[in-house]
Amino acid sequence: ETQRNGIVYIGYGLDFVPRLDEDELNVWWGCCGVANVMPIRITGFHYCYNDSRLQPIISLLSLGVVSTVKCRIRTHLGTHQECLYFLMTFGIPHEALPVNSDGEWKRTNYLKWAKRRQKKEQEMVLYKNAVELPSRADVLLGRGRPTMSHAGNKQLHNLVAQHYDQYDASSRREKTKLAQKLV
């Protein structure tokens, strides 16, 4: 669903002072390039900042982002509380942000994620061929419409339907061999 509807990216640059040297600009344009090849579509980009001197720079960078990422960009100039209200007018609840009402970063969810990710990376040695993001050729296990409507499940269903008569007429041993061949 995220790939179909897209995501909204929120940049939170309050109290950020850019250097605007060549390295920083290369990182900025590199991020724009990465956004084009990500498997997730970015539909909106909100950037919050509190230094009015950054407005011309952010406007210039916004033009570059629109041409490379092709998404709607909104910039919000104000205090932390004002930025929260701006985002709420676009339907973004303040509870979803990793910043509390005082402007301090909420780190508990990040730390939980980092611990899960570290554990997963340690286990990856055991599961080298594990699939993190299924492709159109993968078969998903589960019940319900989302699983059955996945492209890989449809392909398997069609393949099984093509061999149904052969399977039905086979002996028990031949059925086992045919099932292994299909999988």
Image (tube, helix red, strand yellow):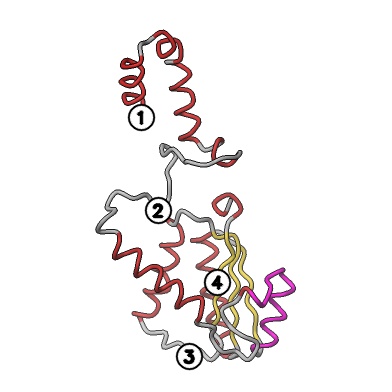
Q: Is residue 5 magenta?
A: no
Residue at coordinates 37% horizontally, 49% vertically from top-left?
131
Tag shown at residue 183: 1
Tag shown at residue 17: 3
Question: Mark 2 = which residue?
Answer: 132
Q: Is residue 149 above or below residue 111?
A: above
Which comes before the other along the chain, label 4 or label 3?
Answer: 3
Residue 93 image position (x, y, % from top left): 69, 73
Task: Measure the C-alpha gap from mark 1 to mark 3.
Answer: 56 Å
> Which amino acid, by three-letter code, is at mark 3?
Val
Which comes before the other along the chain, label 3 or label 2?
Answer: 3
Q: Secondary structure at mark 2?
A: loop
> Which amino acid, by three-letter code, is at mark 4?
Ser
Task: Measure the C-alpha gap from mark 4 to mark 1.
Answer: 49 Å
Which comes before the other along the chain, label 2 or label 1?
Answer: 2
Q: Which residues are magenta?
A: 80-95
Residue 149 image position (x, y, % from top left): 56, 36
Q: Is residue 140 left or right of residue 131?
A: right
Q: Secondary structure at mark 3?
A: loop
